[in-house]
Image (spheres, rainbow, N blue to C red):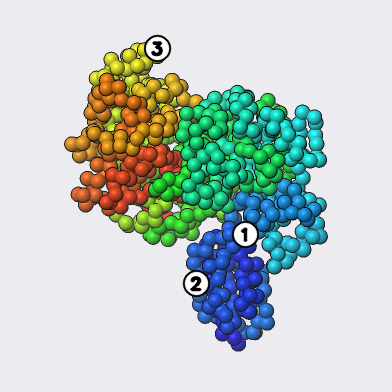
Amino acid sequence: MTRATLIRVRGQVQGVGFRPFVWQLARKYGVAGEVLNDPEGVLIRATGDALPDFIEAISAQAPPLSRVDAVECADHVFDVTPASFEIVASEGRGAETRITPDAASCADCIDDIWGADPRRAGYAFTNCTHCGPRFTIIDALPYDRSRTSMARFEMCRDCAVEYGDPADRRFHAQPVACALCGPQLWLEGPAGREAQNVVEVAARLLAKGAILAVKGLGGFHLCCDAQNAEAVQKLRRRKHRPTKPLAIMDRLEGIARYADLTPADAARLQDPAAPIVLLRKKAGMLPDTLAPDLDVLGVMLPYTPLHHLLLRHVRGPLVMTSGNLSGEPQVIANNEAREKLSDIVDGFVMHDRDILRRLDDSVERETPQGPMILRRARGRVPETLPLPEGFESAPQTVAFGAHLKSAICLIKNGQALLSHHLGDLDDALTWEEFLKADRDYAELFDHQAEVFAADMHEGYRSAQHARARAGTAPYVEVQHHHAHLAACLAENNWPLDGGAVAGIILDGLGLGTDGSVWGGEVLLGDYRSFERYAHLAPVPLVGGDAAQREPWRSAVMRLDRVERGAAADHLFADLPLAMIRQAARAGVNAPLSSSAGRLFDAFAATLGIAPDRQSFEGEAAMLLEALARRAPAEESAYPYMFATNQAGGALDDSDLWADWAKDIEDGLAPEAMARRFHAGVAASFALQARRLIQQGRAKAVVLSGGCFQNALLLEETLSRLKDVPVLTHRRVPANDGGLALGQAVIAAALFPTNR
Ligand code: ZN
Ligand code: ZN
Ligand code: FE
């Protein structure tokens, strides 16, 4: 018998090379015993003199893609003294059920593709335990090669040796491959099919202004030379995408030429998730048509060997935008790409490794207040979030999110899994994706839902689906902005019984409990319940979808409400004002709305910077933020706020418009007015929330809702809440992409144990 230690490692420790890492550490420290996977993570039984150093090294030197949440030790006794250290078979049902997100190529693998070994030199599918495809190639669990789209590629002898050697960087790397045995590239271009020098030929086409479809990790991209304004215009024309910003891909060295790069930005770009990061652009360096009139540009680093190879040959930024038809999900299959993208592209860079899961690029942003997630997808899912104290015995719950930026959320074992961004459920193919994701995530994570949740808006297809799925099981209809509040609480680990908070929820649209459309609210509540403490004075939202697409409609209604209709007549003389005014009076397709998103639209329209008809959601608000950033910061000392003397209720915005009128009369620059507007909105809502704190009714302030993806609004709001605790989003989107998390925790709070 030998006295030993049982070491339990929790966190993201499976499928990231953790066992071989432990094996190598054990050799280094002369430790004997074994390591294995089990349902709780990684388990080590070990003995040796250097055990304390060994244990310390486990978290200090953990592999790049792992995340160690805890290392717990207990006594153990070996019946037979082990002579060596071994990796042994998994124990327990449900072991190896964790999947890590896809990861950008690691530095070692990039060295391999620039190296001399012909198996990997220039090989576009090089990967190892520390990088490469994961979630996008998995068909089913447990995660091993036979259940991935690598199954059809039989490893050559050399790859098999690497795969089987714990000392090798490719030990148990399921997608391991080399030029002799793995997936192959080819090009389908104007000159037919070419399998030789694919990257060189593709680069030459791009240099000549061609648009190519390039198969990536989670889908096809449309690619062209980002410095070639003509090619960019051609892409926009063919894709019917007039103004929506296009993401670009470049090497880190190149980016600083045309964008401001803070250390935080650089770190985020280099994260293994390799998201698109919004960077402040330097004027005049790249065609403005990449992101017309905006002050930011979406940039990502190359994240597959193919991207690295392409960029080395092109030597400049490439547009890399989702390969899809307008409004549809991204294309993933070769045939689908040929069918749908032929009219857009001049050629295809294809390969024969199938994409099994469609994943858009994630979109993120660094702000002085921390990171911001705008779209959560490739590289971030299927990461889980631990739930706060009080949710330990929460039932298995599923929530179905919103309608336009849909995502679903599962709760199981005290963890929440928020799915990837799915998109607009009005699109038939996205709807299919949504249904597929529901089945798929449940199957993959062995999830048997006991409690169901969705938005209380019965018109949402997600809600209709939820009701049908729930049958007779507990089903919770959640108010949209309460869900935003709860998502922010859960993300910030606010305990179930942590007390009430004041939620400033500035958002687009969500159905309220009174049947009107909310969106500019101060809610007072917790996970279980809430009251509507204050809200923006409502105006009619005329014309359903048109009201969202056409900012001038909101402007007219706002100005009419404060008896400034004459100003609207003047500003929007060539638009059908009489029609919408009549609809508003008659109450035809004109529900009242307190939406803050529409207030931003309205203000942008009155400054003349909003298109009559937006070509993508949030366009006017993004232009307004960009405009405001051009103003000197002194303008943020806004001389007025709306509804200063009100405590709760409908907040009157007549002062705002009175000062707007005065600013116009004084000839104040639109930049300054935009800046003052941001500051005024921030100050007005902060004031209401602060009152709830002062009265002892709220313990903290929560900031959520889609408007808080406006970094200037966030900054202005935080600057007015410096002396009170404030919770904001960092890992979950503030917009409807995070809604399902809020719905799920609310449902779990209402049905703490469904037994
Ligand atoms: Zn690697
Ligand atoms: Zn091989
Ligand atoms: Fe929302």
Per the image, the residue denoted by label 2 is 72
Residue 565 falls left or right of residue 279: left
Tell me the CA gap for discs 2 and 3.
70 Å
Tell me the CA gap for discs 1 and 2.
20 Å
Asked if disc 2 and disc 3 are in contact, CB closer than 8 Å, the reply is no
Within 8 Å of ligand 1, the CB of disc 2?
no
Per the image, the residue denoted by label 3 is 574
Local secondary structure at mark 3: loop
Q: Residue at x 65, y 67 (%)?
A: 20
Q: Is residue 302 visible?
A: yes
Which numbered disc flags the more N-terminal residue, 1 or 2?
Answer: 1
In the image shown, does 699 or 392 lie closer to the viewer? Answer: 699
Q: Residue at x 25, y 26 (%)?
A: 659
Q: Which of pointers 2 and 3 indicates the residue nearer the eye?
A: 3
Identify the image quadrant of residue 427: top right
Q: Position of residue 123 (x, y in %)?
A: 74, 49
Instruction: Specify the amino acid type for callout 2.
Output: Glu
Please say if 353 is above or below 389.
Answer: above
Residue 224 falls left or right of residue 720: right
Residue 365 falls left or right of residue 654: right
Q: Position of residue 635 (x, y in %)?
A: 30, 34
Identify the image quadrant of residue 31: bottom right
Asked if disc 3 and disc 1 are in contact, CB closer than 8 Å, the reply is no
